[in-house]
Amino acid sequence: MSAAISRDEIHRRLDSFRAHWLRELEEWKEQGLTGEEQKAAQRFWIDLFSCFGVSAARMNLFERNARRGSTGGAGRIDLFYPSVVIGEAKKPGVDLEVAYQQALDYLNGGTVRDFEMPRYVLCSNFEEFRLVRLGDADSGFDISFGLSEVVDNLDALKFLAGYDTVTKREEEKASIRASQLMAELFTAMAGDDVDEAVGDEAPTNYQDEELRVHETSMYLTRLLFLLFGDDAGLWENDLFTRFIEENTTADNLGPQLNALFEVLNTPENRRGRVPESMASFPYVNGAVFAEPMRTQYFDVQMRDALLRACRFNWSEISPAIFGSLFQLVKSKEARRSDGEHYTSETNILKTLEPLFLDELRHEAERLITSRSTTVKALRAFRDSLADYAFLDPACGSGNFLIVAYRELRRIETGLIVAIREREGTLDELALDVSFEQKLSIGQFYGIELNWWPARIAETAMFLVDHQCNKELAQRIGAAPERLPISITAHIHHANALALDWSLVVPEPRGETIIFGNPPFIGQYTKTKEQTQDMRRVWGTDYDGYLDYVTGWHAQAMKLLKNRKGQFAYVTTNSITQGQPVPALFGPLFREGWRIKFAHRTFSWDSEAPGKAAVHCVIVGFSREDFKPLLWDYPRVNGEQVAVPVATGINAYLVDGPNVLVEKRSQPLADIPKVTYGSKPADGGFLVPKAGVDIAGDDEVAARYVRRFMGARELIHGTYRECLWLENLDPVDVQRSEVLRQRIEGCREFREQSTPSGDAYKLKDTPHLFRPNKHRPLVPYVGIPIHVGESRRYFTVQRLEPEVICSNANFQVEDKDGLLFGLISSSMFMAWQRTIGGKIKSDLRFSNTLVWNTFPLPELTDKQRTSIIKAGEKVLEARALHPERSLAQHYAPLSMDPALVRAHDALDRVVDKAFGASRKLTNERQRLELLFRNYSEMTE
């Protein structure tokens, strides 16, 4: 058999099987034969399995030695199909519970290895069957039926032909085991010392990596194809496994595999004399086996690793993770991580479903469920799926393309079934199923910078196509033949930002849909070449602040300028925060693009070992009419929550006016400017470490000691001193050894510093900090540059002018306390979260972007007084626990009730000052007010 057997053929064979064995059982009874059951058991199993295309040549299915879990004694399993089914046969009339318990006893005996553990137990006494699917409550079942009912239970038995539904939990477990097997194979072939970068840092071209790594990589791609083909019905079940077991030794495995590769790349009519062991393999065509390869020489360990891989059921693996398996196998850390690193399909679907899949599903469901829908309408919608083009311009190993194709095929399969049901032909075998199946992997395009993932993507797309054909066959009894390969996905190995995408993706009849997960490279980590890429794609719109990922937005705009389409990317959350927002969204909005959907910041785990999770957003764009969809994540690594959208989603992923907030040199509102604190640039001589008593017994130096407030001191309450010598009397330097030594040390440090830096420029005034004309001379607010995202309120402190604030903080004079109250409010925090930038997930204050744009309306005297008094109540609540630092006061899970009440009261008066009729209850409501005010104040 060259492919998975069709449902119709299984039905026909089962019908013959039933008739034959019912007659045979009747003959046994008529003739009074005894002992026939034992002789007939293997023949019974062979006949049953052959109905599902499992060859009788697999005689190693029978009589496997095993140990009993209950007694430790030796026994023999009647039937064992590794990773699939264990079977036990008994005489007619015997209770099948006995057979079932015996099978479980063997499974618990320790001789069946983890990767061989079957999913099913099948018992029979010739007259009856009992079939148990092992697993959790969601996937397991236990059914019994008579021999005369075997045809009616085809759907329960179809797993024998490879038509089995794998649960997410089972798929995940299988994926982990698959990664372990790949790691074993790679290590056996290439050695455990190989340790290459993966992901975005992987070699761009195969010439950049070691020859043994390149050759092993190519070998693994071919072996994957063969392993998958063995279990997924590309040819007779376990054909490759038997080839390895029966026709190779460690000494001849390499030459035998090379010969097999050549056979697979040769049409049947041009093969000549081929050994019988290879003759059953079909012609594959395509690039998988086309490239000549040097013969690899194996040892016993390498052959054993391959055999272990052969005994695993590869059809359980989603092709969406093949790329991850094969990329990560080159990393030593990943090989030892027990398969923990691979992209979740859940995150991929967060991009694909709201972009286009959900709309197509809903339309298909509407057509299928409506009684008035005609066959013509169903066919028209099915055919329209072939009009799209799909592009992932940073495709890696094809994960997004694979999931997109699989989900679209499921939509198409549902339509094909509905058409057949309406025509009354669902149970009829189609002569040419390809006439009904229109969607093609030829509609899918990818661009990938690194050579190895690009090669994997082509193979994985073919494999998912085959899986989809199996699903189609389950529904209608037949599916298109894909061997030899004649249609492939179009995967281009190239730099996506140096390529004209219109040369990659011809304009289709329908829409061009673009999606993917471009590289996470920030503004300050771009290479010179990557900066050139950005200038190339953005042209005069490039301002130097855009993250590298935004180059894919520019390219999408160019491709779709004169064609229908939509696009969505997973990106770092920085594109929706801070200064880069207008630079990216300004050009997009000018071209008519609007945000169709968005996922606010969530945690995307890196596949690369040792790399931290990235805080991402997903933003989809369209120029058509749509109902915007928005999701929030109260915890970045938690579940998504739908957010109602009334106005529209703006560039900050907020429901509000479509405004772009740009930094300003002066405050928009009637508030003073915020400035940086004072910079020591002293080498630790003017500002020693926390806990150091600068003056000691030196009374002269003690007159110049001030409290120093850096970010850590401000937030965590630690005490630190500095020498503040702004009004230094020169005579005091001669009278104080401490002053003399510290000023001299600072002078030497600055003289030895880099001439272009601040410290060197201050060498002639070694007793002074960097000049700061804005140093407060009245009570002021100290504002840390960064605060944790989990804080409910911005952690600021009112300070006296004698306290020296460092340049790790901002500072603003606040004689009456109004500004303290404003910055301590939830209203300001909402603006900070939305407009300010972030370092990872920490909030980053900016005087020009956050403070100067804060849309505070003109306040009445009464409103000013109310805010000042409410701020004083916050300080009073803090004073109830003077031993606590700001970090302790504002720990998210343990804020003191008195402090919470004080902040609630402050929010009430600030919310009303901004125009609310009452205290607002959430950030969304505050942002609506803020953006409305900003829009009005900037008109």
Image (cartoon, rainbow, N blue to C red):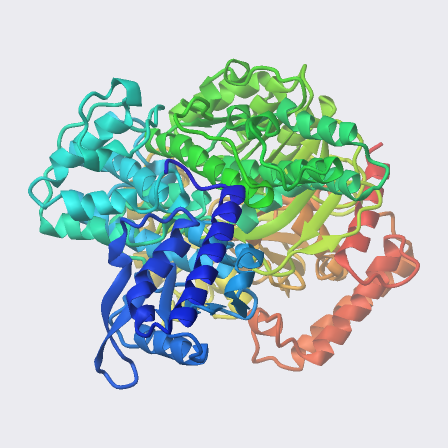
Front in this rendered view, residue 590 or 448: 448
User: Viewed as shown, does residue 531 lie left or right of 669?
Assistant: left
Q: Position of residue 588 (x, y in %)?
A: 68, 26
Q: Quadrant of residue 434?
A: top right
Does 254 sit above or below residue 923? above
Question: Above or below — where is 403 with respect to 585?
Answer: below
Residue at image position (81%, 70%) is: 905
Q: How many marks?
A: 0
**Image quarter of residue 491:** top left
Where is residue 365? Give x, y as percent. Answer: 75, 43
Question: Can residue 578 be seen in this snapshot?
Answer: no
Image quarter hosting the N terminus? top left
Residue 353: image x %, image y %? 65, 42
440 vs 88, left or right, is right
Q: Residue at x 80, y 43 (%)?
A: 656
Q: Nearer the viewer, residue 771 or 846?
A: 846
Residue 789 at x, y percent in the picture = 59, 58
**Along the horizontal axis of the image, is 767 left or right of 186?**
right
The answer, for residue 470, to whether it is visible in the render is: yes
Residue, far front: 31
User: Residue 418 versus residue 787: which sits nearer the camera?
Assistant: 418
Residue toward you, 16 or 812: 16
